[in-house]
Every structure is written in structure tokens, then in C-alpha cells.
Image: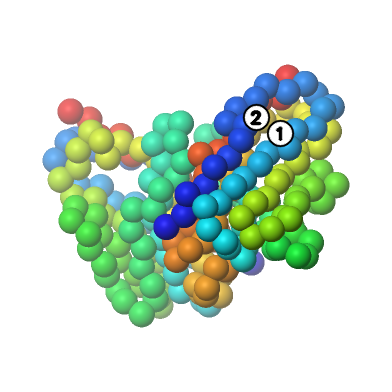
């Protein structure tokens, strides 16, 4: 199993600003995954964060908009840049140790 | 890439009845199929999973069946209870499950409501 801590748990942001979400895992993992869940929708993978290399982004997501850091095997950050109301979502950090475990999520509201 | 379709989008059943949710996937290389339950305002949590080397798996009131030929899998919940009310997501893993690694593609979700 894995215990994943995410912060902030929620935030209200102004259009045009950026916010960084932090994810801490209680064990060392090779890959960390960042998902987005828009209101009432499914989970969409944004990118896979690998320690020591650049993140791998899924189609429709770019590094300039969602820069990711992975400084060590237990920590990662996702930044949502130049936010617009369309970025209002829950952002979830996850790791796979056998099964896929999710953090509690960060609920962002962009005004 | 993988594409997972899920039906129905909403499902309402009476307490004690059974509920069935169905998913299809596109990538024949996928061989890991988990189901997640997400209660309102909470994170998704794994409730059951199946790998391609088995056709069915049961855990108390929940079961999952897999038909690799047809590329579909289903979640069955028997004797439903009000606490089963949640959104359920199916998922498929591209290229199989290895170590810490491959990503999951999720279905669109099913809102299950169990009525008293």
C-alpha cells in the first residue's frame, strides 16, 4: 500500500495566476502519476513523473501549462500555469505499488 | 492508445437487488482491469481487479468477469446496500502491469444509486 499526502486540498485562484500542488508519498516509487478530474467527469492522465528525467505528457497536455518536478523518489509537484476557469478541477497524485493509489486530491476553483 | 467505454452512466437499483456495470476496451495488449469506487468528495479506491489470465474473480458481494475475446469486462454487485451508492470507474492498463509502472486508462464512470 501507499500513503499519499497532497496539498493544498483546495484553493480558489484568480484567472492568470499559477498554483503548485505538492505530493508526498510514504515510500520510494519509480513513477508518480498526475490525473485531472473535471467536475462530474472521469480521471484523465496528465503526465507521468519519473525521478531524474523529464515528465512524460499525455496528448492534450503540455509542459508549459503543467510543469512537473520530481526531485526525489517520494515527492513531486504539479504546477497549473496561467489558470483559466476551464482549469477548475480536482488534481490527483497517484502511485502504483501493485494497485494504483490516489492522494486525496486538490480541488482548484478558478474565478 | 487505449480507449475504455463504460455503461450505463447512471444506474438506480432497489436495496437488495443486483447491479451490473459493463466496460469495453480497445487495446488487446491490456491485461489488467481494476474497478474503483469513488464516494462523493473522496478519492477513488480500488474495490476489485482482474488480470487477463482469469475469467472471473469474486470478493464477497462483488465480482468481476472478463471476456478477452470480446474485450469486455463487467462488475457485479449483489445484495446492494445504500452504502454501495457511489461512482464506479473501470480501467484498463496498457501493455499490462509491471513493477511500478504502466498507466491506467479509465472509463467514463457509472453513478450507482441504491434506493431504500
Question: How many labels were placed on the picture?
Answer: 2
Residue A99 placement (x, y as % from top left): 44, 61
Mark 2 closeness class: few <14, some 14–19, many ≥20 residues within 10 Å: many
- Which one is earlier in the sequence, the residue at label 2 or at label 1? 1
In this rendered view, identify the residue nearer to me: B12 or B95.
B95
Rendered image coloring scheme = rainbow
Taking the image as shown, residue A11 lies to the left or right of residue B78, namely right
Left or right of A51 on screen, residue B75: left
- Residue at left 47%, top 49%? A3
**Image height of B26 relative to B81, above or below:** below
Q: Quadrant of the C terminus of chain A?
A: top right
Residue at figure coordinates x 19%, y 42% from the top left: B80
Residue under numbered circle 2: A108
Tell me the chain of label 2. A
User: Residue A17: x, y in percent?
Assistant: 82, 28
Assess disc 1: are there few (<14), some (14-19) or many (≥20) residues with their C-alpha within 10 Å of its C-alpha.
some
Chain of the residue under the numbered disc 1 shown in the image = A
The Cα–Cα distance between marks 2 and 1, rounded to whole angstroms, is 8 Å
Which of pointers 2 and 1 indicates the residue nearer the eye? 2
Give me the disc on residue A87.
1
Q: Are marks 2 and 1 in contact (CB under 8 Å)?
A: yes
x then y, percent, for residue A67: 79, 48
Amino acid at each position: 500500500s501507499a500513503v499519499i499526502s497532497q496539498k493544498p486540498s483546495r484553493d480558489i485562484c484568480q484567472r492568470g495566476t499559477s498554483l503548485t500542488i505538492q505530493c508526498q508519498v510514504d515510500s520510494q516509487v519509480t513513477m508518480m502519476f498526475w490525473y485531472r478530474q473535471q467536475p462530474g467527469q472521469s480521471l484523465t492522465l496528465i503526465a507521468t513523473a519519473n525521478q531524474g528525467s523529464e515528465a512524460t505528457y499525455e496528448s492534450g497536455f503540455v509542459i508549459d501549462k503543467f510543469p512537473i518536478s520530481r526531485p526525489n523518489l517520494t515527492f513531486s509537484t504539479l504546477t497549473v500555469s496561467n489558470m483559466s476557469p476551464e482549469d477548475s478541477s480536482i488534481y490527483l497524485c497517484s502511485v502504483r505499488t501493485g494497485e494504483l493509489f490516489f492522494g486525496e486530491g486538490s480541488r482548484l476553483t478558478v474565478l | 492508445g487505449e480507449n475504455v467505454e463504460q455503461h450505463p452512466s447512471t444506474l438506480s437499483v432497489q436495496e437488495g437487488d443486483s447491479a451490473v456495470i459493463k466496460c469495453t476496451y480497445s487495446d488487446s495488449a491490456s491485461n489488467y482491469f481494476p474497478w474503483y469506487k469513488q464516494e462523493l468528495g473522496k478519492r477513488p479506491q480500488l474495490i476489485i481487479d482482474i488480470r487477463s489470465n482469469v475469467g472471473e474473480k469474486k470478493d464477497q458481494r462483488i465480482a468481476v468477469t472478463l471476456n478477452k475475446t470480446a474485450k469486455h469486462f463487467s462488475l457485479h454487485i449483489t445484495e446492494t446496500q445504500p452504502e454501495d451508492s457511489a461512482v464506479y470507474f473501470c480501467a484498463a492498463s496498457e501493455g499490462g502491469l509491471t513493477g511500478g509502472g504502466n498507466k491506467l486508462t479509465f472509463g467514463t464512470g457509472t453513478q450507482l444509486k441504491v434506493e431504500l
